[in-house]
């Protein structure tokens, strides 16, 4: 753990300038493989952008954190932690959004280091799928609805994760996964 005032690796921010939003939270389900995938899949709005393939990958997600950075400009980060999996090599994926009066604007995301056997499929999904899916959202910065997805993750799913993990879907809800174009409900 770095001391307050010590620059973070690759950043001009210090530990005291970056706070986990809305504070550091220790959760008993941290590291529980499959927990976050189920919570994402049960969320009534986010599930619309999660394909069956996304669910298989999200099964390996072990934790989610949201950080708020106030210096030099206001932005929020979504940190997705993953266990070892056959899809990609990253242990942590980060997507950053600049926050303004107009809402969230994607500014950066960690490049996903796809596993050699999955790289061709990942490329096909990014270039040939007309619809939005979770990992296309993560990699893309100019996708329609991107800010809304970030808002739902940071302001709804993250603080209320148990509600969505335990949520029972209504009959017929989420029984089909996205294949066409996506329009994020408000």
Image (tube, helix red, strand yellow):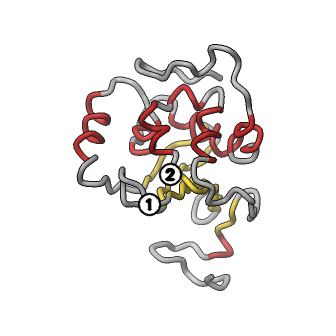
Q: Residue at x 56, y 24 (%)?
A: 184
**Which residue is nearer to you in this view: 90 or 16?**
90
* Among the two numbered marks 2 and 1 on one chain, the one whose residue lies closer to the N terminus: 2
Label 2 neighbour load within 10 Å: few <14, some 14-19, many 20+: many
Residue at the spot 68% in from the left edge and 75% down from the top edge: 16
- Image height of 105 relative to 44, above or below: below
Closest to the observer, 59 or 163 = 59
**7 over 129 or under it: above or below:** below
**What is the total number of numbered labels drawn onto the structure image?**
2
In the displayed structure, does residue 73 sit left or right of residue 20? left
Task: Say which element carries label 2.
Answer: loop
Depth check: give the residue in front, 105 or 185. 185
- Left or right, 113 with respect to 157, comes to left
* Contact (Cβ within 8 Å) of mark 2 with mark 1: yes
User: Looking at the image, which residue is at 24% across and 54% down?
Assistant: 116
Q: Position of residue 27 (x, y in %)?
A: 74, 59
Is residue 27 found left or right of 114 in the rendered image? right
Q: In the current view of this chain or complex, which residue is farthest to the top?
A: 172
- Give the labeled residue for mark 1: 84
Mark 2 and mark 1: span between their CA atoms?
A: 7 Å
For mark 2, what is the residue? 60
179 lies above or below 91: above
At a point 50% along the width and 32% down the height, the residue shown is 50
Is disc 1 placed on a helix, strand or loop?
loop
Measured as percent of width and height from the top left, residue 37 is found at 57, 42
Give the crowd class for mark 1: few <14, some 14-19, many >=20 residues within 10 Å. few
């Amino acid at each position: 753990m770095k001391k307050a005032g010590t620059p973070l690796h690759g950043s001009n921010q210090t530990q005291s300038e970056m706070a986990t939003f809305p504070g550091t939270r220790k959760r008993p389900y941290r590291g529980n493989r499959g927990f976050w995938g189920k919570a994402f899949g049960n969320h009534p709005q986010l599930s619309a952008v999660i394909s069956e393939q996304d669910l298989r990958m999200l099964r390996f997600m072990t934790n989610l954190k949201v950080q708020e950075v106030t210096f030099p400009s206001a932005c929020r980060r979504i940190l997705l932690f993953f266990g070892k999996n056959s899809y990609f090599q990253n242990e942590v994926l980060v997507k950053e959004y600049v926050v303004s009066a107009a809402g969230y604007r994607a500014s950066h995301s960690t490049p996903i280091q796809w596993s050699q056997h999955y790289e061709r499929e990942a490329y096909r999904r990014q270039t040939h799928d007309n619809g939005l899916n979770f990992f296309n959202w993560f990699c893309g910065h100019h996708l329609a609805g991107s800010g809304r997805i970030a808002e739902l993750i940071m302001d709804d799913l993250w603080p209320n994760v148990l509600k969505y993990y335990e949520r029972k879907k209504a009959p017929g809800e989420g029984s089909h996964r996205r294949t066409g174009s996506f329009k994020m409900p408000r």
